[in-house]
C-alpha cells in the first residue's frame, strides 16, 4: 500500500497527535482516538488501514489542523483510482489557493488599517 520508508497520511496524523500530547507510545494515542485500539494503530502504521473521517477530524481538532485539508488528504490516501486521486488533489490545490488569497486580503486590509491609524493629523490617510 505504501512505499517502503514512506509514512502514510493516516499514521502521520497519529504521530502529530502523539507529539502534541507528549505521548511516546502508539497505545497512548489509541486510548484517546475514537474507535481506535492498538491493532488499528498498528495497521495504520503498516499502511494496511486508514483513519476514518471521524478519527481524522478528531485529530485535526486536537492538533489544530485545517479540517478541510485533513479530509482532502485522507481522501487522497484512500483513493482507489488515479482519477479519484486526481480529483482530490485538484480540490486540495483550490483550497490552498483560496487560503492564500484570503490570507493576502487579510494582510492587505491589516496594512491599510494600520497605516491609516498611524498617519499624523491632516494627512491623506486619516478618516
Image: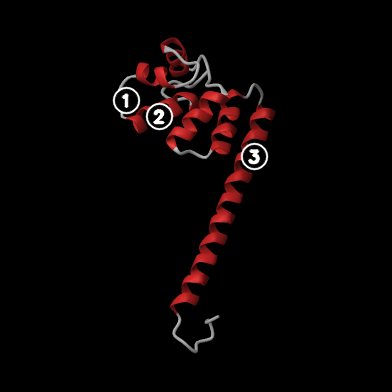
Tell me where residue 116 appears, x and y as whole percent. Answer: 50, 76
Q: Are marks 2 and 1 in contact (CB under 8 Å)?
A: yes
What kind of colouring is applied to the model shown? secondary structure
Disc 1, SS: loop
Cα distance in 3D space between marks 2 and 1? 8 Å
Q: Which image quarter holds the C terminus?
A: bottom right
55 or 87: nearer the viewer: 55
Q: Residues within 10 Å of mark 1 (few under 14, many from 20)?
A: some
Badge number at residue 23: 1
Q: Residue at x 52, y 21 (%)?
A: 51
Q: Residue at x 36, y 27 (%)?
A: 18
Q: Along the polypeptide, which appears first: circle 2 or circle 1?
A: 2
Q: Residue at x 55, y 53 (%)?
A: 100
77 or 116: nearer the viewer: 116
Badge count: 3
| Residue bearing the label numbered 2 | 17
Cα distance in 3D space between marks 2 and 3? 25 Å
Disc 3, SS: helix
105 versus 31 height, above or below: below
| Residue bearing the label numbered 3 | 91
65 versus 52 height, above or below: below
Q: Are marks 2 and 3 in contact (CB under 8 Å)?
A: no
Q: Is residue 88 left or right of residue 65?
A: right
Q: Is residue 48 left or right of residue 30?
A: right
Tell me where residue 65 appears, x and y as whole percent. Answer: 48, 38
Tell me where residue 80 appears, x and y as whole percent. Answer: 64, 21
Q: Along the polypeptide, which appears first: circle 1 or circle 3?
A: 1
Q: Can you tell which of label 1 and label 3 is closer to the viewer?
A: 1
Q: Are marks 1 and 3 in contact (CB under 8 Å)?
A: no
62 versus 36 height, above or below: below
Amino acid at each position: 500500500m505504501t512505499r517502503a520508508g514512506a509514512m502514510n497520511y493516516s499514521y502521520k496524523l497519529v504521530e502529530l497527535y502523539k507529539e502534541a500530547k507528549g505521548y511516546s507510545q502508539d497505545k497512548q494515542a489509541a486510548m484517546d482516538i475514537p474507535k481506535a485500539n492498538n491493532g488499528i494503530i498498528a495497521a495504520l502504521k503498516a499502511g494496511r488501514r486508514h483513519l476514518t473521517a471521524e478519527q481524522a477530524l478528531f485529530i485535526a481538532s486536537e492538533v489544530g489542523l485545517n479540517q478541510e485539508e485533513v479530509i482532502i488528504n485522507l481522501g487522497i490516501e484512500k483513493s482507489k483510482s488515479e482519477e479519484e486521486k486526481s480529483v482530490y488533489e485538484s480540490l486540495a490545490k483550490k483550497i490552498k489557493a483560496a487560503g492564500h488569497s484570503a490570507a493576502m486580503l487579510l494582510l492587505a486590509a491589516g496594512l491599510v488599517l494600520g497605516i491609516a491609524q498611524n498617519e499624523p493629523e491632516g494627512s491623506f490617510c486619516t478618516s
